[in-house]
Amino acid sequence: MHNKGPIPQQHDGSGLRIGIVHARWNETIIEPLLAGTKAKLLESGVSEANIVVQTVPGSWELPIAVQRLYSASQVQSSSAGSGSTAGDLLGSSTTDLTPLPAAGASTGPFDALIAIGVLIKGETMHFEYISESVSQGLMRVSLDTGVPVIFGVLTVLNDDQARARAGILDGSHNHGEDWGLAAVEMAVKRKSWA
Ligand code: DLZ
Protein backbone atom coordinates (compact mmCIF):
# COMPACT_ATOMS: atom_id res chain seq x y z
CA MET A 1 0.00 0.00 0.00
CA HIS A 2 1.37 3.43 -0.92
CA ASN A 3 2.37 5.42 2.13
CA LYS A 4 1.56 9.11 1.65
CA GLY A 5 2.90 10.02 5.09
CA PRO A 6 5.77 12.39 5.80
CA ILE A 7 9.35 11.43 4.97
CA PRO A 8 10.55 10.57 8.50
CA GLN A 9 13.21 12.67 10.19
CA GLN A 10 15.38 11.28 12.97
CA HIS A 11 15.35 13.29 16.20
CA ASP A 12 16.81 12.46 19.58
CA GLY A 13 13.98 11.91 22.04
CA SER A 14 16.13 11.18 25.07
CA GLY A 15 15.06 13.31 28.04
CA LEU A 16 11.67 14.14 26.49
CA ARG A 17 8.47 13.54 28.46
CA ILE A 18 5.50 12.49 26.39
CA GLY A 19 1.89 12.17 27.56
CA ILE A 20 -0.49 9.91 25.66
CA VAL A 21 -4.26 9.87 26.20
CA HIS A 22 -6.29 7.31 24.30
CA ALA A 23 -10.00 6.59 24.04
CA ARG A 24 -11.33 3.11 24.87
CA TRP A 25 -13.87 3.00 22.04
CA ASN A 26 -12.83 0.69 19.17
CA GLU A 27 -10.14 -0.89 21.33
CA THR A 28 -9.00 -3.44 18.73
CA ILE A 29 -7.90 -0.55 16.52
CA ILE A 30 -6.62 1.61 19.38
CA GLU A 31 -4.33 -1.12 20.68
CA PRO A 32 -2.07 -1.42 17.58
CA LEU A 33 -2.09 2.35 17.11
CA LEU A 34 -0.88 2.81 20.69
CA ALA A 35 1.74 0.10 20.21
CA GLY A 36 3.00 1.76 17.00
CA THR A 37 3.14 5.13 18.72
CA LYS A 38 5.09 3.82 21.69
CA ALA A 39 7.45 1.79 19.48
CA LYS A 40 8.57 4.92 17.60
CA LEU A 41 8.91 6.94 20.81
CA LEU A 42 11.16 4.27 22.29
CA GLU A 43 13.14 3.89 19.03
CA SER A 44 13.72 7.66 19.11
CA GLY A 45 15.26 7.42 22.57
CA VAL A 46 12.32 8.41 24.78
CA SER A 47 12.57 6.29 27.92
CA GLU A 48 9.66 4.12 29.02
CA ALA A 49 9.59 6.00 32.34
CA ASN A 50 8.99 9.25 30.45
CA ILE A 51 5.94 7.98 28.58
CA VAL A 52 2.71 8.40 30.53
CA VAL A 53 -0.41 6.72 29.15
CA GLN A 54 -3.90 7.54 30.36
CA THR A 55 -7.30 6.52 29.03
CA VAL A 56 -10.71 8.14 28.63
CA PRO A 57 -14.04 6.55 27.64
CA GLY A 58 -14.32 8.03 24.14
CA SER A 59 -12.75 10.52 21.75
CA TRP A 60 -15.07 13.28 22.92
CA GLU A 61 -13.21 13.27 26.25
CA LEU A 62 -9.74 13.62 24.69
CA PRO A 63 -9.39 17.45 24.70
CA ILE A 64 -10.20 17.93 28.40
CA ALA A 65 -8.01 15.00 29.41
CA VAL A 66 -5.03 16.22 27.38
CA GLN A 67 -5.45 19.71 28.75
CA ARG A 68 -5.69 18.54 32.38
CA LEU A 69 -2.83 16.10 32.01
CA TYR A 70 -0.59 18.89 30.76
CA SER A 71 -1.68 21.30 33.53
CA ALA A 72 -1.05 18.59 36.10
CA SER A 73 2.49 18.07 34.84
CA GLN A 74 3.14 21.82 35.04
CA VAL A 75 1.87 22.07 38.61
CA GLN A 76 3.78 18.97 39.55
CA SER A 77 7.07 20.21 38.14
CA SER A 78 6.71 23.50 40.04
CA SER A 79 5.95 21.65 43.29
CA ALA A 80 8.34 18.74 42.76
CA GLY A 81 8.65 16.66 45.89
CA SER A 82 5.22 17.61 47.25
CA GLY A 83 3.94 14.12 46.48
CA SER A 84 1.21 15.42 44.15
CA THR A 85 0.49 13.30 41.08
CA ALA A 86 -1.14 13.80 37.70
CA GLY A 87 -3.65 11.19 38.80
CA ASP A 88 -4.55 13.33 41.81
CA LEU A 89 -4.93 16.38 39.61
CA LEU A 90 -7.16 14.64 37.12
CA GLY A 91 -9.46 14.17 40.06
CA SER A 92 -10.01 10.43 39.79
CA SER A 93 -9.12 7.37 41.76
CA THR A 94 -9.31 5.06 38.72
CA THR A 95 -6.46 2.59 38.75
CA ASP A 96 -5.14 3.38 35.27
CA LEU A 97 -4.10 6.85 36.39
CA THR A 98 -0.36 6.59 36.68
CA PRO A 99 1.36 8.72 39.30
CA LEU A 100 3.82 11.20 37.80
CA PRO A 101 6.72 11.00 37.55
CA ALA A 102 7.53 7.30 37.44
CA ALA A 103 10.79 6.15 39.01
CA GLY A 104 13.69 7.38 36.87
CA ALA A 105 11.48 9.80 34.92
CA SER A 106 12.28 13.42 34.11
CA THR A 107 10.37 15.92 36.22
CA GLY A 108 9.47 18.77 33.84
CA PRO A 109 6.10 19.30 32.16
CA PHE A 110 5.30 17.21 29.11
CA ASP A 111 7.19 18.17 25.93
CA ALA A 112 4.42 16.83 23.70
CA LEU A 113 1.06 15.14 24.05
CA ILE A 114 -0.56 12.58 21.81
CA ALA A 115 -4.35 12.12 21.65
CA ILE A 116 -5.43 8.80 20.19
CA GLY A 117 -8.99 7.90 19.23
CA VAL A 118 -10.90 6.08 16.53
CA LEU A 119 -14.17 7.57 15.32
CA ILE A 120 -16.13 5.37 12.95
CA LYS A 121 -19.09 6.86 11.12
CA GLY A 122 -22.46 5.46 12.12
CA GLU A 123 -25.99 6.12 10.91
CA THR A 124 -26.48 9.41 12.71
CA MET A 125 -24.76 12.81 12.85
CA HIS A 126 -22.86 11.80 15.99
CA PHE A 127 -19.63 11.21 14.07
CA GLU A 128 -19.66 14.67 12.48
CA TYR A 129 -20.26 16.48 15.78
CA ILE A 130 -17.60 14.54 17.69
CA SER A 131 -14.97 14.71 14.91
CA GLU A 132 -15.36 18.46 14.50
CA SER A 133 -15.36 19.22 18.23
CA VAL A 134 -12.46 16.95 19.07
CA SER A 135 -10.22 18.28 16.31
CA GLN A 136 -11.05 21.89 17.26
CA GLY A 137 -10.59 21.09 20.95
CA LEU A 138 -7.20 19.47 20.49
CA MET A 139 -5.95 22.32 18.33
CA ARG A 140 -7.14 24.76 20.97
CA VAL A 141 -5.27 22.96 23.74
CA SER A 142 -2.13 22.95 21.61
CA LEU A 143 -2.25 26.67 20.79
CA ASP A 144 -3.39 27.71 24.29
CA THR A 145 -0.60 25.78 26.02
CA GLY A 146 2.08 26.16 23.34
CA VAL A 147 2.72 22.42 23.57
CA PRO A 148 2.44 20.16 20.53
CA VAL A 149 -0.69 18.02 20.68
CA ILE A 150 -0.42 15.30 18.08
CA PHE A 151 -3.71 14.50 16.36
CA GLY A 152 -3.91 10.74 16.62
CA VAL A 153 -7.61 10.54 15.91
CA LEU A 154 -8.78 8.44 12.99
CA THR A 155 -12.04 9.70 11.50
CA VAL A 156 -13.06 6.90 9.17
CA LEU A 157 -16.15 5.72 7.36
CA ASN A 158 -15.93 2.01 8.25
CA ASP A 159 -13.97 -0.69 10.08
CA ASP A 160 -11.84 -1.55 7.06
CA GLN A 161 -10.61 2.02 6.73
CA ALA A 162 -9.69 1.94 10.42
CA ARG A 163 -7.83 -1.37 10.11
CA ALA A 164 -5.95 -0.09 7.06
CA ARG A 165 -4.64 2.83 9.13
CA ALA A 166 -3.70 0.73 12.14
CA GLY A 167 -1.38 -1.58 10.23
CA ILE A 168 -3.71 -4.55 10.74
CA LEU A 169 -4.51 -5.23 7.08
CA ASP A 170 -1.73 -6.91 5.10
CA GLY A 171 0.72 -4.34 3.77
CA SER A 172 -0.94 -1.45 5.56
CA HIS A 173 0.85 1.25 7.48
CA ASN A 174 0.38 1.88 11.20
CA HIS A 175 -0.34 5.59 11.59
CA GLY A 176 0.57 5.36 15.26
CA GLU A 177 4.20 5.21 14.15
CA ASP A 178 3.84 8.59 12.44
CA TRP A 179 2.29 10.05 15.61
CA GLY A 180 5.20 8.88 17.76
CA LEU A 181 7.72 10.38 15.34
CA ALA A 182 5.72 13.60 15.02
CA ALA A 183 5.65 13.99 18.82
CA VAL A 184 9.44 13.66 19.09
CA GLU A 185 10.10 15.97 16.14
CA MET A 186 7.73 18.65 17.40
CA ALA A 187 8.96 18.43 20.99
CA VAL A 188 12.58 18.85 19.85
CA LYS A 189 11.75 21.69 17.44
CA ARG A 190 9.60 23.48 20.03
CA LYS A 191 12.56 23.59 22.39
CA SER A 192 14.68 25.19 19.65
CA TRP A 193 11.93 27.76 18.94
CA ALA A 194 11.61 28.78 22.60
C1 DLZ B 1 -20.95 7.62 21.62
C2 DLZ B 1 -19.80 7.30 20.73
C3 DLZ B 1 -19.99 6.80 19.45
C4 DLZ B 1 -21.36 6.56 18.87
N1 DLZ B 1 -18.96 6.48 18.66
C5 DLZ B 1 -17.71 6.65 19.11
C6 DLZ B 1 -16.60 6.31 18.29
O1 DLZ B 1 -16.69 5.80 17.16
N2 DLZ B 1 -15.36 6.55 18.80
C7 DLZ B 1 -15.14 7.11 20.05
O2 DLZ B 1 -13.98 7.31 20.42
N3 DLZ B 1 -16.19 7.42 20.83
C8 DLZ B 1 -17.45 7.19 20.41
N4 DLZ B 1 -18.52 7.50 21.21
C9 DLZ B 1 -18.27 7.94 22.61
C10 DLZ B 1 -18.03 9.45 22.76
O3 DLZ B 1 -16.75 9.81 22.28
C11 DLZ B 1 -18.11 9.86 24.25
O4 DLZ B 1 -17.26 9.04 25.01
C12 DLZ B 1 -19.53 9.72 24.81
O5 DLZ B 1 -20.45 10.43 24.02
C13 DLZ B 1 -19.60 10.25 26.28
O6 DLZ B 1 -19.29 11.65 26.31
Image: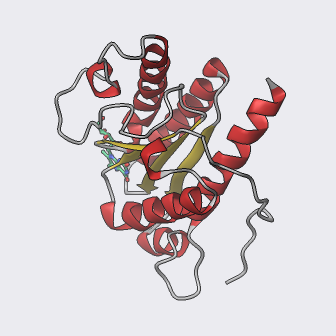
| Residue at 24% from the left image edge and 42% from the top image edge | 96
| Residue at 29% from the left image edge and 18% from the top image edge | 83
Q: Can residue 51 be seen in this snapshot?
A: no
Instruction: Report the side of 9 relative to 66 (left or right).
Output: right
Image quarter in which the N terminus is found = bottom right
Q: Nearer the viewer, residue 34 or 99?
A: 99
* Count of numbered labels shown in the rendering: 0
Residue 18: image location, x then y, percent: 53, 41
Q: Nearer the viewer, residue 142 or 124?
A: 142
Indicate whether 92 appears above or below 163: above
Q: Can residue 78 be seen in this snapshot?
A: yes
> Ligand 1, what quadrant?
top left
Residue 59: image location, x then y, percent: 40, 43
Image quarter in which the C terminus is found = top right
Indicate whether 90 appears above or below 170: above
Q: Nearer the viewer, residue 187 or 143?
A: 187
Which quadrant of the view contains residue 95? Answer: top left
Residue 78: image location, x then y, percent: 49, 12
Indicate whether 17 appears above or below 180: above
